[in-house]
Amino acid sequence: MKDKKILSAKQIIELTSQQYANTKSIQALCGGCGKAKALEIKNIIRQKLENEGYYLPANLIPMDKLVDYLKINISYYQRVVNNEK
């Protein structure tokens, strides 16, 4: 079994500050989940947005929707990064 890669607060902030998420960024934010799970998450979010009438770039989903789906507390990670300085 592979070791899950744990991102630092700074890495999470840098990754989530991007406009769109691809499969690799989903894998990273999920703690190193497999490609199949990342694709499943991406397809769930993509399907929901397309049903709401959004047009999305190929193979990308909006990062803010991924953050909401994964329930990532951005303000917490920002506080952690600020306290490290």
Image: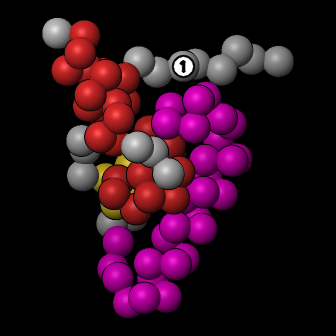
Residue 40 appears in the rendering: yes
Q: Which of the 4 image quarters holds residue 47?
A: bottom right
**Rendered-image quadrant of the N terminus:** top right
Looking at the image, which residue is at 53% across and 51% down?
70
Q: Would residue 48 be found to the left or right of residue 9 on screen? A: right
**Rendered-image quadrant of the C terminus:** top left
Q: Would residue 6 be found to the left or right of residue 40 on screen? A: left
Q: Position of residue 30 (x, y in %)?
A: 57, 37
Q: Nearer the viewer, residue 78 or 39?
A: 78
Q: Which of the 4 image quarters holds residue 77?
A: top left
Q: Position of residue 35 (x, y in %)?
A: 65, 41
Looking at the image, which residue is at 66% across and 57% down?
40
Residue 33 colored in magenta in the image: yes
Q: Position of residue 72 (x, y in %)?
A: 45, 45
Residue 80 colored in magenta in the image: no
Looking at the image, which residue is at 23% across and 15% down?
83
Residue 60 appears in the rendering: no
Q: Main secondary structure of the magenta part?
A: helix
Q: Nearer the viewer, residue 9 or 29?
A: 9
Above or below 57: residue 10: above
Q: Would residue 36 be found to the left or right of residue 39 on screen? A: right
Residues packed near mark 1 inside 10 Å, few (<14), some (14 to 19) or many (20 plus): few
Q: Position of residue 71 (x, y in %)?
A: 50, 51
Q: Would residue 42 be found to the left or right of residue 53 on screen? A: right
Residue found at the very far right of the displayed protein: 1
| Amino acid beneath label 1 | Ile
Q: Which residue is mark 1?
A: 6
Q: Which residues are magenta?
A: 28-56
Above or below 66: residue 11: above
Q: Which of the 4 image quarters holds residue 65?
A: bottom left
Residue found at the very far top of the displayed protein: 85
Question: Helix or strand or loop: what does disc 1 sit on?
Answer: loop
